[in-house]
Image (spheres, rainbow, N blue to C red):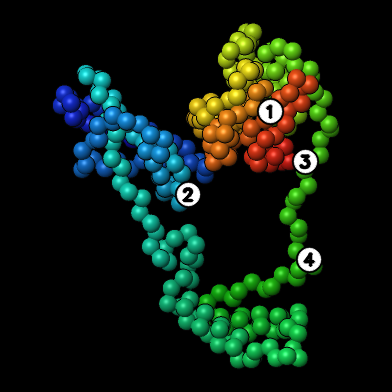
Amino acid sequence: MAEAVPVRCPACLRENGYTAPVFPCACGSPVNPPLDLSAPPLLLTHRTWSDSWVTVRCTSCGRESEWPHPEVGCGSCGTVVRLPVHPLEQPEAGTGRGAGPGAGPGATAGAAASAGAVGSAGPAGPGRAGGPADQRGDASGEAAGAAAAGAPAPPPAADPAHMPLPPTAAVPRPAFRPVTIRTARDAVATAALYLRWLGFQDVRQPDGRPIPSAAVDLRAPGLVAQVDPTTAPAGLRAVECVWLNGLTASATSVYFSLAGYTEDARSRADDLGIPLFVMDLTGMPQPVNDPADALVGSGA
């Protein structure tokens, strides 16, 4: 856990203790925003969506992710300040994740020698088709040049006839049986059935009767879903809230609506990768964006 640091309030000059939050990277390592304690805290008077996030690089895998920008409220006067964060430094050339152990002067010489070995074969003339035998000969020249320079030899060229095709077929499953929607409770039950049909296990519904004017949460391992049984289109705030809930739980966020979505909500869902579904009164959810189509195709 990160240590608490003192933060002086610019309004009343009181020092407040602040501990930077620790977030889970996709690789499982903890990451936290690197605070710049040499810079004074900034008074937060206006909040925008873009300024509320900061890019943090994981020190274990190098993955860059966006997390909430560190903020602290004064315990005396209530002033909220935003803490400066060290800017994200770009990796130097040759030291990033794409550079292997041979990326150096020796590798450059090996590449030159390899290029010379390939160039010695001469360009393909009009009568040369450049078939598999020629490709194998060029690969042998590259391997010989790399071996002479002490660099690792490139892998042999794969035969296109034996290259596996990417999985494009949808996960086979029986047809979904819709349930007619007459009440808000029917909408929640239909969404839960549909999520189970997609492959999510142990989908939990709230115990009480759903309120017709409020959205209802559904939870499952690795899933945070929200069902809006109202007659108004779901807006931008609703989509962002379900995304934040999923981000907090490190789970997939899904949204179901009876009345569709506003244009801003659909645009934000596409940016955040949130699957959106619309349910009609027959009880058949329909995907309305690309993330939803991908979820239907791949399943949970």
Q: Secondary structure at mark 1?
A: strand
Tell whether label 1 touches label 3 (CB within 8 Å): no
Q: Earlier in the sequence, mark 3 or mark 1?
A: 3
Disc 1 designates what residue? 278
Mark in front: 1 vs 2: 1
Disc 2 designates what residue? 63
Q: Secondary structure at mark 3?
A: loop
Tell whether label 3 touches label 2 (CB within 8 Å): no
Q: Is residue 193 visible?
A: no
Q: What is the C-alpha distance between the residues marked 1 and 2?
A: 34 Å
Q: Earlier in the sequence, mark 4 or mark 2?
A: 2
Q: Position of residue 99 (x, y in %)?
A: 48, 65
The amino acid at mark 4 is: His
**Whether residue 42 is situated above or below residue 65 in the rendered picture:** above
- Disc 2 crowd, CA 10 A, few/some/many (<14, 14-19, 20+): few
Q: Earlier in the sequence, mark 1 or mark 2?
A: 2
Q: What is the C-alpha distance between the residues marked 3 and 4?
A: 24 Å
Q: What is the C-alpha distance between the residues marked 4 and 1?
A: 42 Å
Mark in front: 3 vs 4: 3
Q: Secondary structure at mark 2?
A: loop
Q: What is the C-alpha distance between the residues marked 3 and 1?
A: 21 Å
Disc 4 designates what residue? 162
Residue at the location (48% across, 41% down)?
25
Q: Position of residue 290 (x, y in %)?
A: 65, 41
**Whether residue 281 is situated above or below residue 271 in the rendered picture:** above
Q: Which mark is residue 171?
A: 3
The amino acid at mark 1 is: Val
Tell whether label 2 touches label 1 (CB within 8 Å): no
- Disc 4 crowd, CA 10 A, few/some/many (<14, 14-19, 20+): few
Q: Position of residue 235 (x, y in %)?
A: 54, 27
- Disc 3 crowd, CA 10 A, few/some/many (<14, 14-19, 20+): few
